[in-house]
Amino acid sequence: MNNSCVFIAVGGSWLNNSSVPSQFKALADRLVEKGVQVVLLVQGKMDEEKSVYPHIYNWPSKRPTKIQDALFLIKLINKYHPNCLITQFAATNIMVLIGWLMRIPFRIVWYHTLNTQLRLDWSDSQLKFLYLRERKRFIYRLATCIVPVSNAAKKDFEHTYRIYNKSKVFLNGLMNRLYESLCLASKENQLICVARFDHTKGHDVLIRAFRKVIVDVPGAKLILLGDGKLREQYENLVLELELNNSIKFLGRVSPDEVISQLRSSKLSVLPSRMDNCPLALIESLSECVPVVASKVGGIPEIVIDGVTGYLVEPEDEAGFASAITKILLDSNLQYEMSKNAKEDFLRRFEINKIIDDQVEWLQKIGVF
């Protein structure tokens, strides 16, 4: 055991196989193997895990943004004396600010959401948006390192906040479930789209494109998983286009149900207007499911055009319809892309490879 101690804000629970918490729990486990003491800070109750992993703490608030969360963090820092804080999402402001005030040497922030995404989906006042951006700029300046989850995110971060020479890119990773045989499985002409119903995700483009798909592929089905503020608007669009027998909204489902639906699908589609490094696409590759997605943001860093799927310009309904139809009607292409998807996942996105690289980097910069 060395003298290093790392605090990690994992977000929510990993017990239901949620992708981001599972990644950070895997990082914690690997650091513990290296002799590092790790304290996990979780949004939501994790009492059932404390017997096997004693250093798990729940934030006092549902979102750790309040004064009681700051006081709670100060108390834990005084107890464990960490030399590194790793944070993301809602916990970022408090952890970086308190870490800076208490002179924690390493204050590392994961950067998941592009500023350009936030701007496209923003519905409040422009003044508030600018205020929140400047507040985040202040916090990022106090961090010692930013970890964007794509090269596109690195460019977005540096362009937005004018902070340079502070970034280290790590793509998202997922556990390999070892279901290679699914590449050979016979499936119905079902497509799946896993995304929240926000403007940036482009569901309206996909719905209109699907009207063209079923002309060439009668009986094709589109399954939409997720929820959000625009769901009712898109449900009305489906009714307007008389596609309600072909497009189904399943709402927000468990991670296990997402995997079940993926395994029943020939194709995963994401028509984003802007996106970073969507875990839904990496999950698709892991389950041997080819992808048709927009050529924006970090998506081209996940999907190899013509190999593991097709990339289409955003807003291009005809392009999406053509790419989807081409894969659905060509079983040989479907097989090759399915096989390539799994191979590329194992090569670039399997969680153990990602974690090995992250741990090596943390050791190199002196965290332990």
Image (cartoon, rainbow, N blue to C red):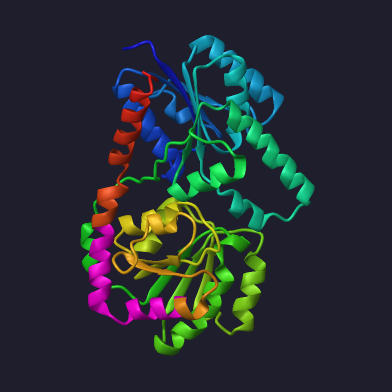
Quadrant of the image occupied by residue 33:
top left
> Was residue 294 drawn as part of the magenta stretch in this picture?
no
Q: Residue at x 26, y 75 (%)?
A: 333
Q: Which residues, given as a range, are shown in magenta?
A: 320-342
Residue 1 is left or right of residue 42, and the answer is left
Q: Point out residue 120 in the picture as x, y percentages from the top left corner.
A: 64, 58
User: In what quadrant of the picture does the N terminus appear?
Assistant: top left
Query: In screen coordinates, is 296 left or right of 287?
Result: right
Query: Can residue 265 be seen?
Result: no
Residue 15 percent across, percent down from the top left: 43, 39
> Viewer-proximal residue, 122 or 301?
301
Residue 54 image point, x, y percent: 43, 20
Q: Quadrant of residue 78?
A: top right
The answer to whether 240 appears left or right of 299 in the picture is right
Is residue 333 shown in magenta?
yes
- One can see residue 82 in this view: yes
- Name above or below for residue 91 compared with residue 226: above
Helix, strand or loop: magenta stretch: helix
Using the rendered view, name the quadrant where residue 45 is placed: top right
Residue, x 28% and y 39% (percent of image)? 352
- Residue at image position (24%, 51%) is 178
